[in-house]
Image (tube, rainbow, N blue to C red):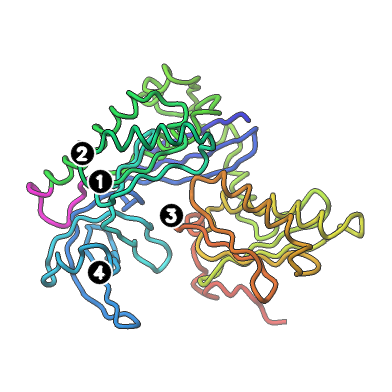
Amino acid sequence: MSVKLIYEQNNRSSRLAVLNDKELTEVEFFDTSRANEGNIYLGRIVKKIELANGKTGYFLDIGDNRDAFINGEEPELEDLIAAEGQSVVVQICQEQRAEKGAKLTRALQFVGKNLVYCPYRMDVEISNKIEDKTRVENLLELLEDNLTGQEGWIVRTSAMDAADEDIVAEMDVLRNKFDEVLKKTEDVKSPALLLERNNCLEDAFLRNLKHLEKIVLNNHNLEDKYKDKIDVEYCLNPFKEYGIDELIGDALQKEVKLKSGGRITIEETKACVAIDVDSGNDNGRGSFGRLNIEGAFEIAKQIKLRNLSGKIVIDFAGSSDYKYLKNAIDILEQELRKDYIKSTVFGLSRGGNVEIVRVRRRPTLLNVMTEECPTCQGIGSVEK
């Protein structure tokens, strides 16, 4: 596996593409003027609303162009809110998309290279991608020996090969970030940005470091930052040079052709993402089992590339009996485990569809690149 990061920056906006063995596998758009996932704010309560089943929610002003939402059942939230106007420290867990504002959480997370610090949790969680049981036990013991009180930690996959002293040092760095956020709340008035998430290039660099071959970028300052860590290539127009825009255009199409002649069709709706696998021009050259296996690999790739999230419903070709779809379901689970955003494959529904839920953090590629037609409001049909 060989990974290249293609990064293009223009003023406050930037674009990142991940090429895995020359194949586009991930795209991200980053704008420092927007409320990005991971940002921490001192927000101000502007409205309390009643939800179903007697639950409550709150809209907060975080200084963005649209109020953000937080569930009233967030830990300790009720104790903190006396009335509208109350200031609350919150973090964006889902970015604004289409007609919906950002979603907030009080369960703050501070992301490092090997660790994620969760100051309001009280447990230590190890990445399930670390399969060496001895190393898992050593990491648990290391973290527990260096706890400073009631605090939580998530150990990332990269910690598998990290030195123990580096992990302990990182614990102090992340704790200091939290202390700085709390101190800043004393000097600002809500709404205010307290901590901005890492640039998307830095996040991608840390995620892909193990297999990273090169970074291609158009910023000399970043070139100097990374050139001692990895092979760096300066390029005036990286996306144009590597044909990324054309590859993104392909990723916006509803239909994806399979090498066998079959195809998958992807429809993003407000309720869910619907994916259909059918034989297309695959005229009996193989079984539906082979077609569905090929489709499963491609679906996992498209989920990550298009950043599909929320509920995903898949209608595979042929019979909907579990025994015929088991291999395809296993492949979906196997491939999605490689994704840094968590997905859960629920298996077959009673209607014979495979259901997946992927954590929603940012808008999909389609949401970022397009907008609903004001004339047809997204229907897109014409009279016969």
Please name the residue that numbered disc 4 is placed on: 59
Span highlighted in magenta in the image: 185-195
Amino acid type of the residue tagged 3 in the rendering: Arg
Residue 193 falls inside the magenta stretch: yes
Q: Percent position (x, y) of residue 321?
A: 76, 69
Please name the residue that numbered disc 1 is placed on: 151
Please name the residue that numbered disc 2 is placed on: 148
* Separation of marks 2 and 4 at Cα, in angstroms: 34 Å
* Separation of marks 4 and 3 at Cα, in angstroms: 19 Å
Which is more toward the observer, 11 or 317?
317
Residue 59 falls inside the magenta stretch: no
* Separation of marks 2 and 3 at Cα, in angstroms: 33 Å
Vertical relation: 384 (above or below) 281: below
Point 74% across, 61% down: residue: 325
Task: Tell me the crowding category of disc 4: few under 14, some 14 to 19, or many 20 or more residues within 10 angstroms, Cα based.
Answer: many
Task: Name the disc covering residue 362, or none.
Answer: 3
- Assign the N terminus to one quadrant of the image: top right
Q: Percent position (x, y) of residue 106?
A: 26, 57
* Separation of marks 1 and 3 at Cα, in angstroms: 27 Å
Q: Nearer the viewer, mark 2 or mark 4?
A: 2
Q: Percent position (x, y) of residue 259?
A: 80, 48
Task: Tell me the crowding category of disc 1: few under 14, some 14 to 19, or many 20 or more residues within 10 angstroms, Cα based.
Answer: some
